Amino acid sequence: MASLTRTWWGKRFIAALEGFTDPGRLGRGRSYARSDRIQKFSIQHGQVKATVEGKINPYFGVYKTPYYTTTVEITPIPENRWPDIIKRLAGHAGIVSKLLMNEMPDEIESAFTELGVHLLPRSGKDFKTKCSCPDYYNPCKHIAGLCYFFANKLDQDPFLLFELRGLSRDRLNKELAKTPLGKALAQSLESAELPLQPVGSYYTRPQRVTVESCSYDRFWSGEHRLSTTLEPLPPLPALPAVLVRKGGDYPPFWQQDQSFIEVMSEFYERVRKQLKET
């Protein structure tokens, strides 16, 4: 069965869920996530919430399509721990640069572990789940389906993990942007707004110019020889595909299993090599 998530952080999220959930309910949860049964999905106040469409089952007296309110909450990190965490994150150049470009750094967990906390859930102790269905088992298939559905959202937006842990996206970006590296990267990622200038026509109008007459011999021989040396090309940016990285590893339009950033970075590197060889 194909995986519902493609990033390492999405898979780690699912691994924590699968570590304490009944396999049968996990299988049914995956089918829920792949269908249109997850409705009214939202993330508010650190909670993942949705209305999940159940199934008609006359054996249990269910003759109409039921709808269950399902909630998944990740234990938040205490508010007084975040200043130290942000300070520790800001001390790692690689972490700051990737977070400001909507990427999840591979070494992100080590920065949290150094302070005795963790960003990604590790076990059932990190989850607080609730569902209005009559299933006595928690997490039920509806909760599992919502978790799989949310993990797919994490592929496109890893910042959701910070929000579930108690730190808003805006606050994280503002704090990271205060660091020297953060300031430099934030400026390079900001797109300057060009002023609007009125034009008389959408098309280039022809202009009359005076052309000096020239003999064929003078034209082909020329009075000045062309330079035999070419000026060196300006250096390419050290960090390839900066603007492309703003969309993250798996932007909404990208349906491939391989990271969009990896594909574009490889393409930029090939262009860089070709320019050096010419």
Image (spheres, rainbow, N blue to C red):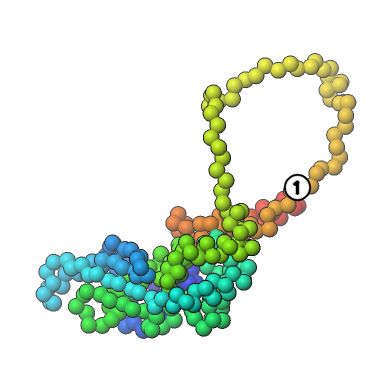
Write the residue at 67% across / 16% down.
208
Outermost residue to the front:
80
SS state under label 1 = loop
Q: Is residue 117 visible?
A: yes
| Closest to the observer, 239 or 25 | 239
Counting labels gives: 1
Where is residue 161 drawn, in percent x and y?
A: 44, 70
Query: Residue at the location (38% across, 68% down)?
Result: 150
Residue 141, image x and y in percent?
28, 75
> On the image, which quarter does residue 40 sit in?
bottom left
Is any atom of residue 30 visible in this view?
no
The answer to which of 42 and 9 lies nearer the viewer is: 42
Asked whether 276 or 236 is in front, the reply is 236
Q: Is residue 276 above or below residue 134?
A: above
Q: Classify residue 84 by image quadrant.
A: bottom right
Q: Position of residue 238 (x, y in %)?
A: 68, 58
Q: Quadrant of the N terminus?
A: bottom left
Kindly identify the residue that appears in the image at 26 percent across and 67 percent down. 52
Give the residue type at disc 1. Leu
Is residue 81 shown left or right of residue 267?
left
Q: Residue at x 55, y 27 (%)?
A: 199
Density class for disc 1 (Cα within 10 Å; few <14, some 14-19, many ≥20) is few
Q: Is residue 278 above or below residue 202?
A: below
Q: Which residue is mark 1?
A: 233
The vertical placement of 226 against 209, above or below, is below
Find residue 129 and report its image quarter: bottom left
Q: Position of residue 190 (x, y in %)?
A: 56, 51
